[in-house]
Image (tube, coloured by chain):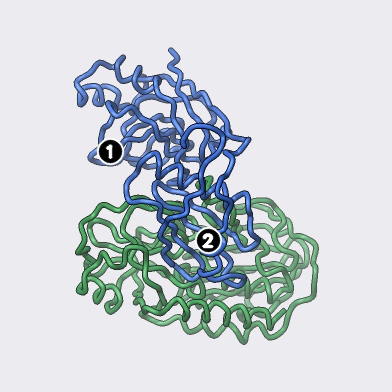
Chain colours: A green, B blue
């Protein structure tokens, strides 16, 4: 059992999300940064998609009601057990009565705090309130060593953040100027961003083809462009269909970076081929499974 | 083809590789009943086949987005699988008819008068036209449980509101752009509101292909 003494802005319990319900209007859901979820869980010996705390913008203070083992991964956060810093992707023991504090740093916007055994209270997808008590499941394995070797990608979140994309369903509806702007220039992350979508401000991305798109299926990572020319990166809580023109799709291996886009920070898109996207996905899985 | 218990699985479509793990199958470029049947046939056939690599299906007006596990198959294999689906698919046995009781007019926000005025008909005419049609769940999207209902009488064709509302109440029954819908939860929305239902729309769990009718209550 852990108690959330100070909840933080948007602390939630999240897991790997759920496929298979898009036709009912349900999006994938799950952690906004699936890479952080996998690495934090790997560190404490959990299944990679086990429910964990997702921290956004400001962190919580958590008090352990029993001895627990935990680990975190995410942007450049400071996580303290009482006053001792806990390094990322390394399991640490938190004794009964000790406080775990997470403080957001300068890069990234989210972190995941995983507990050995996973969070067993069925609160997935809801914002955690002050005083909430969450039970921890049975511990399956001992902590895994060496996960911190994979933290480098999170530690290296730079400005502007570089996100790789492939062409979207209506990419050809945009003229050369619009494509040059989209794939060449920087965008600023709007404050009007959430787990549903990240809005971007910057050069107008105007369509050459004025056809009205017909709503069609979209996924986390689909980038739509509004009629005003502003791109929106759809994210894990997106709607399942979208009616704006789709210029690009964030590749699976980089989707976690969308969950680290902090309002006011900058992002740039690099176009890659579908083959590159597949290779990047396989490479990430190979890395991850080498830990297991 | 839209009647009866079987739908023909379409053999002509265009496939677009929209990401390394998704294929967009396009069945036409206008919203029409035949196109909708083709989308539904492919959706039912793929759901029934349930290949282990299938992650999600997103039926829409004229297309079906297929999300797949890129570790298991690639676009070529998915396309090949879709091409050899059985040529006919039964409509799902679970297809249901939902009768949704509606208080037309009534508490704000409501656009019944505005819609009647825009169409130069009476309030009762709008209610009779809306409740007089039988609707088919074309697809779900926008929010969990939000069904796009095809079959609106063309005489009730009104555009979306000029400015969307920040909050449409739960259970609002709405029309816009040739379709009808019921809001399963409160949320932002730009459709024209004709009334409200007390039915728990989430619990009705509309599915693609279900039939929906509206029944006016006092």
Quarter of the rendering occupied by the C terminus of chain B: top left
- A10 up-or-down from A142: above or below: above
> Residue A141: x percent and y percent?
80, 72
Q: Nearer the viewer, mark 2 or mark 1?
A: 2
> Residue A276: x percent and y percent?
47, 81
- Please tell me how crowded label 2 is: few (under 14), some (14-19), or many (20+) other residues with Cα within 10 Å: many
Furthest toward the top, the residue is: B218
Q: Is residue A22 left or right of residue B183?
A: right
> Residue B2: x percent and y percent?
46, 35
| Residue sitting at x 46%, y 18% | B215
| Residue sitting at x 33%, y 27% | B153
> Residue A79: x percent and y percent?
59, 74
Residue A164 vs residue A274, the one in the foreground = A274
Q: Dots 2 and 1: beta carbons under 8 Å?
A: no
Residue holding disc 1? B160
The answer to whether any part of residue A129 appears in the image is: no
| Residue sitting at x 62%, y 68% | A113
- B44 up-or-down from A244: above or below: above
Q: CA distance from mark 2 to mark 1?
A: 31 Å
The answer to whether any part of residue A269 appears in the image is: yes
| Residue sitting at x 45%, y 80% | A157
Residue A11 quadrant: bottom right
Residue holding disc 2? B67
The secondary structure type at the circle numbered 2 is strand
Marks counted in the figure total 2
- Please tell me how crowded label 1 is: few (under 14), some (14-19), or many (20+) other residues with Cα within 10 Å: some
């Amino acid at each position: 059992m852990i108690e959330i003494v100070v909840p933080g802005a948007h602390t939630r319990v999240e897991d790997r999300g759920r496929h298979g319900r898009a036709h009912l209007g349900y999006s994938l859901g799950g952690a906004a940064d699936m890479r952080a979820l996998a690495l934090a869980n790997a560190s404490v010996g959990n299944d990679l998609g086990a429910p964990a705390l997702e921290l956004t913008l400001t962190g919580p203070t958590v008090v352990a009601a029993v001895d627990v083992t935990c680990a975190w991964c995410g942007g450049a956060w400071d996580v303290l057990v009482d006053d001792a810093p806990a390094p990322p992707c390394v399991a640490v023991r938190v004794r009964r009565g000790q406080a775990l504090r997470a403080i957001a740093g300068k890069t990234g916007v989210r972190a995941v705090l995983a507990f050995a055994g996973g969070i067993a209270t069925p609160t997935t997808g809801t914002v955690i309130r002050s005083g909430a008590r969450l039970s921890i499941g049975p511990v399956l394995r001992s902590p895994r060593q060496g996960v911190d070797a994979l933290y480098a990608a999170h530690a290296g979140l730079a400005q502007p953040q570089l996100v790789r994309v492939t062409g979207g369903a209506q990419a050809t509806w945009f003229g050369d100027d619009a494509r040059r702007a989209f794939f060449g220039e920087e965008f600023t992350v709007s404050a009007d961003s959430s787990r549903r979508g990240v809005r971007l401000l910057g050069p107008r991305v105007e369509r050459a083809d004025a056809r009205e798109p017909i709503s069609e299926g979209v996924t986390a990572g689909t980038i739509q462009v509004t009629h005003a020319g502003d791109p929106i990166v759809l994210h894990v809580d997106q709607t399942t269909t979208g009616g704006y023109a789709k210029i690009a799709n964030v590749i699976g291996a980089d989707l976690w970076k969308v969950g680290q886009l902090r309002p006011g920070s900058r992002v740039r898109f690099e176009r890659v081929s579908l083959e590159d996207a597949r290779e990047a996905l396989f490479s990430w899985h190979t890395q991850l499974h080498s830990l297991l | 083809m839209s009647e009866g218990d079987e739908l023909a699985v379409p053999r002509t479509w265009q496939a677009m590789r929209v990401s390394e793990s998704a294929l967009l199958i396009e069945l036409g470029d206008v919203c029409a009943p035949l196109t909708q049947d083709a989308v539904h046939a492919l959706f039912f056939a793929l759901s029934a086949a349930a290949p282990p690599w299938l992650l999600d299906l997103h039926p829409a007006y004229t297309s079906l987005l297929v999300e797949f596990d890129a570790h298991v198959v690639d676009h070529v294999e998915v396309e090949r699988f879709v091409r050899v689906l059985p040529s006919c698919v039964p409509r799902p046995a679970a297809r249901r008819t939902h009768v949704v009781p509606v208080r037309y007019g009534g508490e704000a926000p409501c656009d019944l008068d505005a819609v009647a005025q825009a169409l130069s008909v009476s309030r009762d005419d709008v209610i009779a036209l809306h409740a007089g049609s039988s609707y088919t769940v074309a697809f779900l999207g926008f929010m969990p449980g939000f069904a796009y209902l095809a079959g609106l009488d063309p005489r009730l064709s009104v555009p979306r509101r000029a400015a969307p509302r920040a909050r449409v109440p739960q259970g609002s029954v709405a029309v816009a752009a040739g379709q009808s819908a019921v809001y399963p939860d409160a949320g932002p929305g730009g459709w024209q509101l004709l009334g409200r239902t007390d039915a728990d729309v989430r619990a009705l769990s509309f599915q693609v292909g279900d039939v929906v009718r509206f029944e006016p209550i006092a």
